[in-house]
Image (cartoon, rainbow, N blue to C red):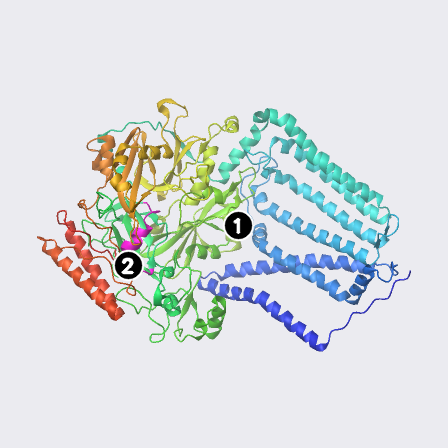
Amino acid sequence: MANRPPVSLPKLSRRSRILLIIAAVIILALLLGARLLDTYVNWLWFGEVGAREVFNTVVLTRIVLFFAIGIFVGGTLALSLWIAYRTRPVFVPVSGADDPLSRYRSAVVGRIRLFGIGIPVLTGLIAGATGQGDWQRIQLFLHGTSFGQTDPEFGNDIGFYAFTLPFYQWLLGWLFVAVTISFIAALIAHYLFGGIRLAGRGGQLAGPARVQLAVTAGIFVLLKAVDYFFDRYNLLFSTRNSLFDGATYTDLNAVLPAKLILLCISAICAVAFFVGAFLRNIQLPAIALVLLILSGVLVGAAWPAILEQFSVKPNANQKEALSISRNMTATKDAFGLNNVQYEDYSGTGQATASQISADTSTVPNIRLLDPNVLSPTFTQRVGRENFYGFPAKLDVDRYTVNGTTQDYIVAAREINTANLTGNQTNWINKHMVYTHGNGFVAAQANTIDRAVSNANSDGGYPIAATSDTQNPTGAGLDPSNPSAPGIAVQQPRIYYGELTNDYAIVGGQAGKAPGEYDSATDGDYRYDGTGGVPIDNWFNRLAFAAKYGERNILFSDAISDGSKIMYNRDPRERVQKVAPWLTVDGDPYPAVVDGKIQWIVDGYTTLNNYPYSQQTQLGEATEDSLSGVARQANNSINYIRNSVKATVDAFDGTVTLYSVDDKDPVLKAWESVFPGTVKPSSAISPDLRAHFRYPEDLFKVQRELLARYHVSDPQEFYTTNTFWNVPQDPTQEGGTNLDASGLANQPGYYVLAEAPGQSGTTFQLTSSLTALQRQYLAAWMTVSSDPSDYGKITVLRLPTTAGGNSQVDGPVQVQNKFQSDSRFAQERTLFSNQSVTVIFGNLITLPLEGGFLYVEPVYIQQRNQNSYPQLARVLVSYGSKVGFASTLGDALKQVFGDGANQAATSPTQPTQPTTSTSPPTSTTSPTTTSPTTTAPAAGGANSALDKAVADIQAALSQLRAAQQSGDFTAQGQALAALDTASKEFAAAQSSTPAPTTTSAPPQPGG
């Protein structure tokens, strides 16, 4: 039968074509409009932080990749379709009038340009959009450097695996995609145009179809040969053995030769496809295909499996010794564990009271305040107005105040718009009035105001001082001298922080823009810093109105000349955008550096292709019982360096990156990609360097690996009997990295102490390690944060002999010992009260005089809305003895005897007698109800105390009257007067014998 002439399709009317064009434009605008808007907003933001070169480099690389991949894949597909169409048979028989294939053929021929161009263009667009996300791989290939180390198998520099091999594999991947799509398209086209006919016995394959399909298949097989060549190097990342990563005995002696054999077979088969294409013989390509499949099964799979089962497994400890040794060396190099200092430590020492009392480094600095518990306490006692707040987890840092260096619980008092209420939540108040926080809060980590006698006692609170606009010197940190300067801050305003997750519009002209709330006495502040993007032109206002879906940005008269919009205000987010190649630590912390509040953020360079190094799941390794920290994505890595320390200015948002590991080849590569974005370590000021902490996420990863890689002998490593475990946190339940008991890993703890081998008091990050699947202590790990020996890892190894008195209790065993102690049971009035919640603080482990001292604070919290945790008791364990008292000194005395309490830092005020009131609550915002705290009773013989009480009562009366009248100015003045009177009361009370009043005064501020 002859080929039926094409059936023409109905043509669209002019009106229909116009409507289709309009619909296409609308769809394109919806698809691209949001992306273009985000691009413009990001362009403005990168200009604000002075990192527009980063933006330009990333965008340009993405655009080039988009077009390169799109044109290559789409062009290859178009070429394949063009060849199939040009070589189609002239006459194609049809099976009848209702032949569906004929109808499809007619439709394609009638719209040949639509199908011949539209399909490749659409495919190219999809491919380009997919491939442009691999811009980092391309830039590392172009700028990669040498590691100066070679792999033990092939002798290649590590840089080949880190920078070059990933690019080759990426390129091969896209070649495979293009060839595969082209083959499928050619197959369909030849079938549609009659080059392939399935009718009749055996069907028919036209010559042009045979040639095109065979050549395309030959190219695919040739690419497979190249892939086998590069796949040899991937054996160095093998995960065949569950105990270690890297090339195993089977990989080296079976799989590696198999790759070479398969490479040769693939090359031969490719030639067979090419030859068969032009010899009009399909048998040769068919034989080549069968050979390729059989060789893959027999050589690539069966032979390695036989060797593994019958040779390696019966002798694995011997066969895998070389691979284990290589894995241990590479893992230690890749994770910075090759300079760990190990020291033997008995852990069973018996310290005396005289030794404890003579200690001047560890015992006086024992941290009693838990930063993971105290956020509500800070919020109520120094948070002041309701719109101020603190992160769920506070931070620990060290400062030198009045010549004494000690660790402090620190936090930035940020704006927290989530706590706004009533009229505070309208658009102007939320985004233009309540724009920033005010103050840096610090509290001595080793003491409290006074000991708690029972559940209703007032006390157990941190001695905190707030360095803010009203107290820039930070006075109040020293209870013996409340007026002495503490941590001075020149600019205490906080526009960028962990709680600032919304945009703010600042600045503007007086009389148009509303004043920003700055303090109780200043509600008309206007931002004058360099942060923010100008929003005083209509184009930017339109862009941001569309970005946030807020018409007020476009129409509000409050936005005027000089107005700026602040967004992307979280410190981690800002660093991640400026340095997208970094993995950012989950716990940024504020520090006062040269008089300014700076957020310090740790940045990591990571790889997942370091030969023989152990793959580690970052998310799992860094997960523990702590809350309030950002969780890492569970990416697989086998190389990590803390190469960058970043700072974010809390006032103007300036992001500064500093190199702290100039030898890191990955950092060098990225510095070549983005020149000038990372400052050298010589640019770090001494004041900033003094506040660097060893990062927690890196510590957790290294701890996880040290639990195994402290072993140096491959035979011992294979038995695993000397491995350690990261201990469970017995004080809390939670987290996601839970064991069978439902307990998460114990976090590392920052402490100020002197460990064995250290020459003085050191600020360090520490952790216990327990024996494998046992709860007794096996080791203790510490990393120094002091500038002089920053990053030095020391591990105290306990004797491995099991049984007898050589075992030292681990954290879980010590916690069980605490809760079974008779004195703990006797405190039922404190712990069994249904109105009280008991919170166990961080269980810190400290090496001391040959043994280990465990210290755990115990907090209580009244079960009502306005209560917050109080430090009520301190638990201490040393050897077989347990101490349980209201102060650390008394607990030490119970364990070590008389005199041991002298070294401990005591509460600053005497214990109050039992009262009938719950802990005081803070004063509230001027826009909410009046304070519930009553003024204290008069002090009797102390005239200063009487005057302070009278001032408090007067201030409370003024505040209630101002709230009833709605006078905000009067409310601010009353709050300021109440704050001053409260401080006067505290100062007068500290010089007075234990009072007999019913409650303490309100604590509105630092």
Residue 375 belongs to magenta span:
yes
Residue occupying image coordinates x 57% and y 60%: 60
Tell me, yes or no, if residue 712 can be seen here.
yes
Q: Secondary structure at mark 1?
A: helix
Cα gap from disc 2 to disc 1, whole angstroms: 48 Å
Residue 265 belongs to magenta span:
no
User: Is label 2 in contact with label 1 (beta carbons under 8 Å)?
Assistant: no
Name the front one of labels 2 and 1: 2
Given residues 233 and 251, the one toward you in this image is: 251
Q: What range of the chain is rendered magenta?
A: 370-387
401 lies left or right of 804:
left
- Residue at the far bottom: name it: 15
Residue under circle 1? Answer: 669
**What amino acid is labelled 2 in the image?**
Arg
How dense is the environment of label 2, judged by Cα within 10 Å: few (below 14), some, or many (20 and up)?
many
Residue 363 is tagged as none
Residue occupying image coordinates x 50% and y 38%: 333
Q: Quadrant of residue 933?
A: bottom left
Q: Whole-percent x and y of residue 912?
A: 18, 46
Q: Whole-percent x and y of residue 776?
A: 39, 30
Q: Quadrant of residue 746?
A: top left
Q: Whole-percent x and y of residue 445?
A: 28, 45
Residue under circle 2? Answer: 384
